[in-house]
Amino acid sequence: MLPSGNDLLISRRHLLGIGAGALVSLSPITTLAATRGVPHRSVFLRDMRTSESLDVVYWEGGRYIPESLRRINHILRDHRTGETAPMKVRLLDLLYTLHKRLGTSTPISVVSGYRSPQTNALLRRQKRGVAKNSFHIAGMAVDIKIPGYSTEQIAGLAKNLKGGGVGYYPRSGFVHVDVGPVRSWRG
């Protein structure tokens, strides 16, 4: 039996909806975070070293909130030197989108946020694989864990968002995300 006109219309709408959903899921992060109809964006962060938590709206009414950005910069500070730096809002939008896509209310556990050049140089001397010109120095990267999700799950979603670099560190148990060029690696 052939579908009636109404059934055919519903099927086409359904098909178009699936196609639109697929396109959105493959869109770059800048498109995802700027989705219309979202009244605000927030991040829920927990620093693993200090146990400080921050759950803050950082974008509302089409603009970023300076006081919220200052508080985010503080929690993502370099803990060795105490220095803060302005974190890129694209990075915050990436974290926001990652958190929303996972559908979790648990905080993002921060392993490492901003790094001063001195801290980065120290880490390069102590560990292999620390980039000389790390995106952490530019406020463009954060290393994270999200309770209840494996590093593989987090890295897979971050790669699909195509918001920048994704480093997957299963033995260390964290994922590096940055807003530099789109690329991925296993550490």
Image: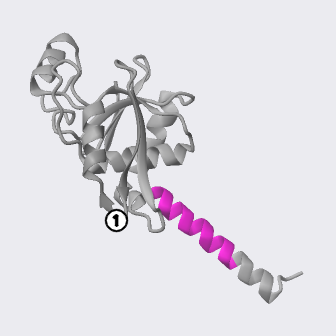
Q: Residue at coordinates 34% horizontally, 58% vertically from top-left?
A: 30
- Quadrant containing the N terminus in the rendered view: bottom right
Residue located farthest toward the right when viewing the structure as drawn:
1
Q: Position of residue 150 (x, y in %)?
A: 52, 28
Q: Nearer the viewer, residue 91 or 69?
A: 69
Quadrant housing residue 21: bottom right
Question: In the shown orientation, is residue 165 left or right of residue 144?
Answer: left
Q: Nearer the viewer, residue 6 or 49?
A: 49
Question: In the shown orientation, is residue 15 left or right of residue 40?
Answer: right
Q: Position of residue 62 (x, y in %)?
A: 34, 65
**As displayed, is residue 70 above or below residue 187?**
below
Q: Residue at coordinates 10% horizontally, 27% vertically from top-left?
A: 117
Helix, strand, or loop for circle 1?
A: loop
**As displayed, is residue 1 above or below residue 129?**
below
Q: Which residues are magenta?
A: 12-26
Residue located farthest toward the bottom when viewing the structure as drawn:
5
Mark 1, residue position = 62
Residue located farthest toward the front when viewing the structure as drawn:
67
Classify mark 1: residues with Cα within 10 Å, few (<14), some (14-19) or many (20+).
Answer: few
